[in-house]
Amino acid sequence: MGWCFDMRVLLTGGGTAGHINPALAIAETIKQNDPHAVIEFVGIRTGKENDLVPREGYKLHYVESMGIRRSLSPANIKALWLALTSPYARATVDIIKTFKPDIVIGTGGYACWPIMAAAARLGIPTAVHESNALPGLAVKRLQGRVDRIWINFEKTRELLRADDRIVHVGNPLRRGFGAISREAARRQLGIPSRKKLILSFGGSLGAEAVNRAVIELMRTQVAGNGELMHVHAAGKRDFAASEELFKRARLKAYPNCFWVDYIYDMPLHMAAADLVIARAGAMTLSELALMKKSAVLIPSPYVADNHQYKNAKTLADAGAAVLVEESALPTGALTDAVVRLLADGRERGEMETRISAFADEKANERIWKEIVGLVKK
C-alpha cells in the first residue's frame, strides 16, 4: 500500500523488553513503508527502554508511571495517584502538543498508559497492541478510549469488551528474525559447524531461578565439552550477583561458556542456536516459531494469571516445545531435558517443524495497513 505522507508517530510501551521489542518492530515496519516518517518514543526513566530505544536511534520522551500491585503499600498509593493524574500532567500533554503525532501506538505495560490516555482524550488516532493471551491492566483500562486494540491471540477478544475495536493482527517481529541462515549466523559469530549451540535467557530483567539452573547445566554438561557452546543472558537487574555465582562455579575458565547481561543481537544468536532455553512470553514464542527453533520453555510463575504457563502448555501439548516449570528446576529437570534433546536430533527436528506451525509472517503487513487506515480516517 503506497503512502505519500511523512507520518509522525509516537510509540509507547516499556518497563521490560517484552513491551519494547514489539514497539521497535512496529517502528521498523513504519520506516520500511514510509522512509521519511518521524518516529519518537515515550517511556519511563527506570525502564529497559532507556537502553533499547536510544540504541536504535530514536528520541525518547518520559512520563511518570508506576506498576500497580495488589497492596496498599506507599509505593502502590503513589502508583494509583500517578495512574489518575499522569494523563493530564503538563509534561505528558506537552509531548503530544509539541510533537503533533498523526497516530499514537502503545504496546502495553504501565509506561504506555499516560500518553495513550492523553492522546485518546485529545482526539488523536490511537491503537494499542496486546501480545499476550491475557490482556494487561493498561490495555484493559484503555479499551474504551483507543480506536483499535490489536491482538495476537484470537481468544483475547473474549476477555475485552470493545469487540468492534479489536483486530487480530499477530505479533510484530523485527526484520532480523528469519533474515539469516543458521550457517551464516554461525560464521558471523565464529562458531564451528561441529559444535552445538545452546542459547538461554530469562527475560530482560533476569530470573534468579533460571540463572541458577543454567549454571548447574553449564557446570555438569557444558564446561570442558568440546562439542557444546552455551550463551546465557542473565538479565541486567541482578547481573552482578549472577555473575558472581558463575565465577564461583569456575565457569569463567571455560571458553565455551558465555555469561552476559543482555543479548542485543538476538536474531543472530537465535539463528545460530541448536536449542533455546527461555521464558514463555508471547513475543519470545513468536520469535521461536518464525525461526523454527527447538526450545525448552520455563514459564515465569510471577505473571498475571500464570499466562506464560498457558502459552508454554499450548506449544508443549502440540509437541512443539518442552515445558519445564520453575518449581522443578532444583530437581535437575532443565538439565535432563537439555541432555535428552541434544542427544536426539530427530526429536529436535520434529519440534522445529511443529513450532513453525505457530509462526505468523503477515503480522507486520497487517499492522501497517491498520496504521494507514487509522491515519487516513
Image (cartoon, helix red, strand yellow):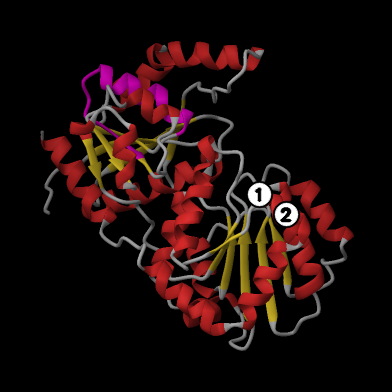
Q: Is residue 203 visible?
A: yes
Asked whether the residues under the numbered discs 2 and 1 touch, taking CB atoms below 8 Å apart as contact, a structural biologist would say yes
- Which quadrant would the N terminus be assigned to in this image? bottom left
Tell me what residue is drawn at x 61 percent, y 79 percent.
190
Tell me what residue is drawn at x 31 percent, y 51 percent.
170
- SS at mark 2 in the image: helix
Q: Nearer the viewer, residue 96 or 367?
A: 367
Q: Which numbered tag is attached to residue 235? A: 1
Q: Which residue is mark 2?
A: 211
x then y, percent, for residue 205: 63, 44
Tell me what residue is drawn at x 44 percent, y 60 percent.
287
Report whether 154 appears left or right of 313.
Answer: left
Q: Quadrant of residue 199?
A: bottom right
Range covered by the magenta-colored residues = 109-129
Q: Is 116 inside the magenta-drawn segment? A: yes
Q: Which numbered tag is attached to residue 92? A: none
Note whether 264 is above or below 230 in the view shown: above
> Hey, what amino acid is under mark 2?
Asn
Q: Quadrant of residue 215?
A: bottom right
